[in-house]
Amino acid sequence: MSLVVAVPSKGRLKEKVHEIFANAGLLIEDPTDSRSYQTKVQGRSDIEIAFLSASEIARELSSGSVHMGITGEDLARETIHDTDEVVSFELKLGFGNADVVVAVPDAWIDVQTMADLDDVAADYRARYGRRMRIATKYWRLTQNWFGQHGIGVYRIVESLGATEGAPAAGSADAIVDITSTGSTIRANNLKVLDDGVILKSEANLIAAHHADWTDQSSTLRREIVERLAAVV
Amino acid sequence: MLDDLLGYLRQVAPDVADVGILQPADPFLETAGEDLRRRIFITETVNGVVHCLRPEFTIPICLSHLSASTDGGAARRYAYGGTVFRQARSGANEFQQAGLEDLGNPDRVAADVASIGDMVAALARVGISSPEIVLGDQNLFTVVVESLQLPQAVARRLVRSFGNAKLIDAQIQRLTEKKRETNGQGEIERLAMAGDHQGLVSHIEDRMRAGNLAPQAGRSPQAIAERTIDLVREQQFLLIPESADILRRYLALQMPLAEAPEALKSFADDTGLSFGLAGKEFVERVEVLSNADLDMSTMTYKASFGRNLEYYTGVLFEAASGEVAVAGGGRYDHLCSLLGADQAIPAVGFSVSLDRVGEAR
């Protein structure tokens, strides 16, 4: 019985994961077949590696079909309902840093906080005949955050790319999006609200509560956390 | 139980509105807001139209009423009953509901009292013989807030939060505290403190051009300028202890409904405010209620009782048996306008939760 760890299948996240695993003495082998999505850690028949896309990793963690996985906290919290009851965040890995933020047009000189946004949202229907629209791909994070700030009367417009362009395109009034340096937000003449940082996200090593845990896999889990903790 | 109750309700509310289980989701999301999405069951057709399993009956009945009223909004009373669907964190997702909506009756007091009476009779029908009834009134709170001459945004925020005691307390507290000083530096602050509306508008227009924002696409430069000036006034505004006291004392009022007219009168005399038309309607309602065949000893007036949904406008009520809330209702004259009616349509109604009734019995 081996432990299954899901890791990103492409891009910079994949490289970084390979690098820290190698530093931790866990060398991820190239798959024997280039079309295969599974491989092993060199010399370890007890650790299985599954290559998945970052959002798939969150889903597999939620269902418990993998024991552990590496993905951004943003995707985990967006994809997994009752996140903290379904998975545990074992280790922050120090890369893939990005903030999920609420941003409004720079021209909204009267809006600096979520409370301001609440006032503005309450007024939309009467003034413009429709609700305030928020473009985002983060439905769950947005609903939770706005709910926490008592904002209910707004509509989410799903955006699957170039969210920061939505206000200029006229498809939304404000956005919830991810940003690492804030430069894209500024370049689009938007500004992040003072209390508009929903989540400071980075890549995390995450364990799935619903996976099939045995004594052996629990021991392996501790080993992987310790080895990675020593190198991040 | 449902059939029996529905049979009774149809005697007092004979009009029929056809409410399917599958409903377009948009009217619900537009009126109750995005927050509702998490609590209802959404499904999509192949061409992308979003539907939901009906989470309640009121909105579909209003929509049906609007599409059927070719006769200029004649008064109608609709009975309804059936399964509604809500996402719950645990337990059931299907609930049995029955109730009544009274739309278009211009005699508000009569319609309010009839609705409360029918709710009590409906509960008796399903074995809840003497429910405890709590009543609140959205209009009275609005009058109290308006009498204090607060900046518009402050007043609106308070009215919007009616029914959420924690939120209101926090707002009153914040209003009595001294704010940080604005230093009057920076172009925006300077313009706002001078009340220079036109100056602000052109400043905002510049920013909109820089961001490629079409001035007519969303918030207008005028609206932003107006709120910017309001905010400066609000910053300088400090709620005097007397006003905070009036708000807190009003919200703490609670007494048997029969004694409420007298209590409100002495509150008004004491504080020097006038409840005006809203007060007159409240007193009339109590009078008509006590002349109806209802047990006044079960009815309590609670000034802070409300629901913070923007379409409620007047009386709000809830019936409980033991500690279990079994039915609730109120007046919602804004709902039909929100749903697209070109004239305000008086509306009041209630809904009985049969699952709760089962629990309470």
Image (spheres, coloured by chain):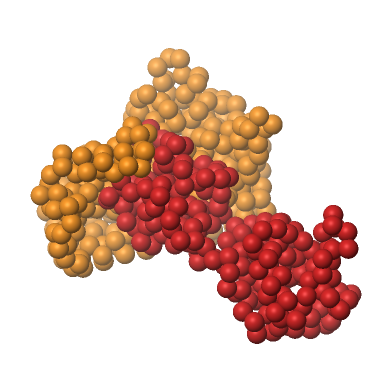
Chain colours: A red, B orange
**In this view of the protein, which residue sits in the foreground, A3 or A64?**
A3
Looking at the figure, which quarter contains the C terminus of chain B? bottom right
Residue B259 shows in the view: yes
How far across and how far down the image is residue B116, in percent?
44, 42
How far across and how far down the image is residue B126, in percent?
60, 46
In the image, what residue occupies the spot 47% across and 24% down?
A: B66
Q: Left or right: A192 with respect to B269?
A: right
In the image, what residue occupies the spot 57% across and 61% down?
A: A74
**In this view of the protein, which residue sits in the foreground, B18 or A13?**
A13
Using the rendered view, name the quadrant where residue A204 is placed.
Answer: bottom right
How far across and how far down the image is residue B187, in percent?
17, 52
Residue A131 shows in the view: no
**In this view of the protein, which residue sits in the foreground, B118 or A98?**
A98
Looking at the figure, which quarter contains the N terminus of chain B? top right
How many labels, in total? 0
Above or below residue B64? Residue A81 is: below
Q: Left or right: B99 with respect to B310?
A: right
How far across and how far down the image is residue A113, in percent?
34, 58
Using the rendered view, name the quadrant where residue A53 is placed.
Answer: bottom right
Above or below residue B304? Residue A232 is: below
In the image, what residue occupies the spot 46% across and 19% down?
A: B69
In the image, what residue occupies the spot 52% across and 25% down?
A: B64
Q: Left or right: A5 with respect to B249?
A: right
Q: Left or right: B275 with respect to B163?
A: left
